Amino acid sequence: MSFTRQFVGRHNFVHTYYAIFAVFALKKLWKTYYYASAYDLSNFSILETSQKDCSYYDLLSAYCYSVNNLKIFIGGINETREDKLRIISDSDIVKKYLHVCVRTFPRNCNICFKCRRTILELDMINRLNEFRDVFDIDYYKKNKLFYLRHLVIKSENYFNKPIYEYFLNKEPELIAKVKQDIIKNKKYARASALPNIKSN
Ligand SMILES: [Zn+2]
């Protein structure tokens, strides 16, 4: 089931709510549920919640959602996203079923912001080929500049920044080329300029 289709709303503002909805829908299966944190603890905030990602206050939400026979905790609150990906990427189940996409289900679309970010992170930790069951890795390799363009354009984003810094160090010439391309033609990085991709 794709929650993004069933529960219309901007992903950043609602994802915790519909993820916890799924947990409660299968409540009899769990006594304790660990919901992965998006941000580390230092980012906790309940200010301007109508303008910000609901993950900023997951710690409070988890406390509110917990009931007598189901406790919800936020997991990995002291780990970076890269740390978390390294930990879960050792699992064969994750390699077969990892789903991060905000557009398609059950297969990841490869091109939404979460798919792009996750594929770049898998490249960063050198685990790309192990995730061929859930991402079109050949498409990524063939269209890497497209992924890097989006990364460069959003390089100040909290999640993108460490990925950008990694590629800036590892492939400085490629990043320089991407920046030149962006300056030459800003429109190229828009979604409408997507290279062709297999339908899911
Ligand atoms: Zn996607």
Image (tube, rainbow, N blue to C red):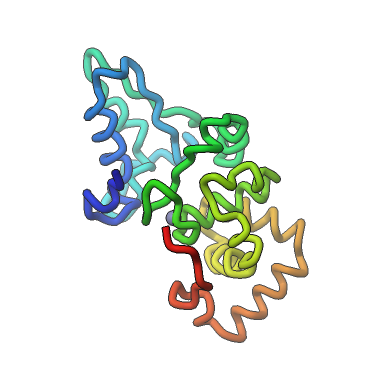
List x then y, in percent, for residue 140.
60, 60
Left of 171 or right of it: where is 107?
Answer: left
Q: Is residue 126 above or below residue 90?
A: below
Q: Is residue 101 above or below residue 31?
A: below
Q: Tell me which corner region of the image, top left, top right, bottom left or bottom right, holds residue 70.
A: top left
**Residue ID at (66%, 50%):** 123
Left of 7 or right of it: where is 57?
Answer: right
Foreground: 11 or 154?
11
List x then y, in percent, for residue 165.
67, 56
Foreground: 115 or 161?
115
Q: Tell me which corner region of the image, top left, top right, bottom left or bottom right, holds residue 67.
A: top left
- Picture quarter with the N terminus: top left
Q: Tell me which corner region of the image, top left, top right, bottom left or bottom right, holds residue 74.
A: top left
List x then y, in percent, for residue 194.
49, 73
**Residue ID at (63%, 65%):** 144
Q: Quadrant of ligand 1?
A: bottom left
How many dots with numbers? 0
Foreground: 84 or 193?
193
**Residue ID at (26%, 40%):** 17
List x then y, in percent, for residue 137.
60, 54
**Residue ID at (47%, 34%):** 41
Q: Residue furthest bottom?
A: 184
- Picture quarter with the C terminus: bottom left
Q: Is residue 137 above or below residue 79?
A: below
